[in-house]
Image: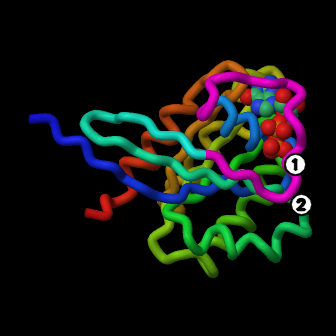
Amino acid sequence: KVLICLKNFTCLILFQDTGVGKSSIVWRFVEDSFDPNINPTIGASFMTKTVQYQNELHKFLIWDTAGQERFRALAPMYYRGSAAAIIVYDITKEETFSTLKNWVKELRQHGPPNIVVAIAGNKCDLIDVREVMERDAKDYAESIHAIFVETSAKNAININELFIEISRRIPSTD
Ligand code: GDP
């Protein structure tokens, strides 16, 4: 007998700097495509995707949030109801890795206590212009018990893996 259960949860993408690739990651995951001229996120957009993993169906409810300063005040509204947060930085821009740490602090202070945090170092196809070492990011992620992967929305690297790992870490509601 094959048992398929549905894990239903909200997942959230957040970030400070526009341009790290949040929308592209969501687009790759939901539509399996890449649009180099994707529109900058205005406010927050919402998408869902259901994937089967082993014998479970996982439904992802994804908020793709704008990272602008003006969004900061609204951020708690989104992450309070979320089981997981993905914080994206751009491996070719050191400053996006530094600001990521502020989001982690913010989440730890004001987010749900058991929120699963995932860190995605996006644009890993651009290794020639890398500014953030994978080792440093990995060590940091381990120190805060966060999931860590380097991703490329462009070349479809580690995008599904990121979401599957998140789903594995979230306890079933049944
Ligand atoms: P957001 O503002 O964080 O949502 O970022 P976008 O998804 O709008 O992406 C910003 C820019 O980075 C766009 O020009 C994308 O085409 C580009 N981009 C996004 N992901 C990748 C990636 O994995 N590799 C490369 N080379 N470019 C990417």
Q: Is residue 38 left or right of residue 110?
A: right
Q: Quadrant of the N terminus?
A: top left
Q: Which residues are magenta?
A: 29-47
Q: Quadrant of the C terminus?
A: bottom left
Q: Which of the marked residues, 2 or 1, is nearer the chain's N terminus?
A: 1
Decide whether residue 46 is among the magenta residues.
Answer: yes
Q: Amino acid at mark 1?
A: Thr
Decide whether residue 83 is among the magenta residues.
Answer: no
Say if residue 93 shows up in the picture.
no
The residue identified by callout 1 is 18
Q: Nearer the viewer, residue 136 or 118?
A: 118
Image location (x, y in percent) of residue 25: 68, 36
Cβ of mark 1 under 8 Å from ligand 1: the answer is yes
Question: In what element is the residue under mark 2?
Answer: loop
The residue identified by callout 2 is 68
Instruction: Look at 49% across and 60% down and name the residue there.
Output: 116
Q: Is residue 34 left or right of residue 42?
A: left
Q: Amino acid at mark 2?
A: Gln
Image location (x, y in percent) of residue 19: 86, 42
Instruction: Look at 53% across and 59% down and name the residue there.
Output: 10
